Image (cartoon, rainbow, N blue to C red):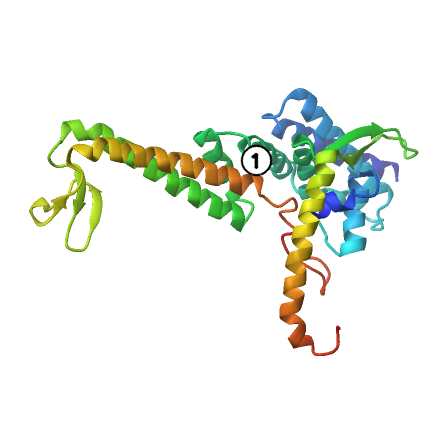
Amino acid sequence: MTSMASLADNRVASYLARLSTALSAVGPAERDEIVREIRAHILDSVSSGTDAAAPVDRVLRLLGGPEELADRYTTERLLTRAGRSFSPWLLLRTSWRWAKLGIAGTITFFVAFIGYAMALALTVAVFLKPFMPSRLGMWLGPKTLNVGVPDHPEAMRELLGHWFVPVIAVAAFAFAVGTTQALRWLISRRSSTPAYKAPAQDSVRAQI
Amino acid sequence: MAILASLWQSRLYGLEILRSLSEKSQLDVAEGTLYPILSRLKAEGLLQSEWVEAEAGHPRKYYWLTAPGRHRAREMAESWHTFSASLADLVQPLLGGKHR
C-alpha cells in the first residue's frame, strides 16, 4: 500500500514538474500559482475519487498531458492579451493557436490570414509602383479586375492612373485596420466555455 | 457563461465548479479546460480568487465574481435566455402538446 501511494506521489510530482517546465512562457509567480492550483485539484480529486484502483491515473488523464495543459494556459493568456491589442503579429499568432482548439478559432485564423495577406499585398504594390509605373496598376479586363501586372495589358484598361498609390495605400490601411478590429471583436466575443467532454447520452454538448 | 453562472451565488473552488456544472446543467467541462479559463477570466477582471486553508490539509483556491463579472454573467444569461426562448418556439410544433 505504501509503495502504491509512493508510486502515485511520484506520478503527481512528475506531472507537476513537467507542467512547470512546459509553462516556461509564463512568469515565475503565475507559474507557481498554476502548479499549486493543479496540485490542489489532484489532491481533492484523489481524496474524493470513486475509482479506488487507480484514482491518480484517472485524475491525471482527465487533466490531459502536462504539455497540453500548459499549452491551453498559454493560449488563454494570449487570447486575453490579444483582445486588448492592436498588434497584427500578436493577433495572427493568437488566432493560429486558437485555431487548434476548434472551429471558431479556425474561422478567426482565416479572417486574420486573408485580411493581413491582402493588406500586405496591397502595401507591396504601393512600393513597387515607382519601379514599374506603366505595368503595375488596377486593370479592368473583359471579365476580370485585378491589382498587379497583367499578362496581356493590351486587352485591359488601367483604372487609377496617378491615383494608384494613394488609393491602394488607403485600401491597404483599411484592410489592416478592418482585420485588426474584426479579430479583436471575434476574440473578445469568445465563449467562456470552449470545449466539453462527451457528456451523458441525453445531455447537452454545445458551446455556450 | 456556464462558469460565471456557477459562481453567481457563492464562492467555489475548481472541483466544486466542475461538480456544480455537472449536477445542475449536465455540462461536463474537461478539467484541463476549466483551469486555464478560470485563469483568463481572472486576468480579464471578471473573477477574483483567494487561497483558503481547508480541512483537507491543503489550501484551495476559491473564486468569486467581481462586479464586472456579475454584469457580464447577467448580459450573457439574458442573451442565452432570448436565444433559447426563440429556439423553444421553433421546436414547439414538433413536440405537439407534450411540453406546453
Horizontal and vertical percent position of residue A4 = 83, 39
Tell me: residue B89, above or below residue B31.
below
Name the quarter where the N terminus of chain A is drawn: top right
Q: Residue furthest bottom?
A: B96
- Residue positioned 72% across, 65% down in the render: A202
- Residue positioned 46% across, 28% down in the render: A87
Give the side of residue A154 with respect to residue A111, left or right.
Answer: left
Horizontal and vertical percent position of residue B53 = 88, 29
Q: Nearer the viewer, residue B44 or A53?
A: B44
Q: Residue furthest left?
A: A154
Quarter of the rendering containing residue A68:
top right
Q: Nearer the viewer, residue A39 or B22?
A: B22
Q: Is residue B78 at all visible to an observer of this figure?
A: yes
* Chain containing mark 1: A
For badge 1, the amino acid type reads Leu
Judge the density around disc 1: few (<14), some (14-19), many (≥20) Cα neighbours within 10 Å: many
- Residue positioned 21% across, 48% down in the render: A145
- Residue positioned 86% across, 30% down in the render: B58
Residue for badge 1 = A79
Tell me: residue A199, above or below residue A20.
below
Q: Residue furthest top?
A: A28
Give the side of residue A80 with respect to residue A45, left or right.
Answer: left
Q: Nearer the viewer, residue B19 or A24?
A: B19
Q: Secondary structure at mark 1?
A: helix
Q: Nearer the viewer, residue B68 or A62?
A: B68
Give the side of residue B100 with respect to residue A183, left or right.
Answer: right
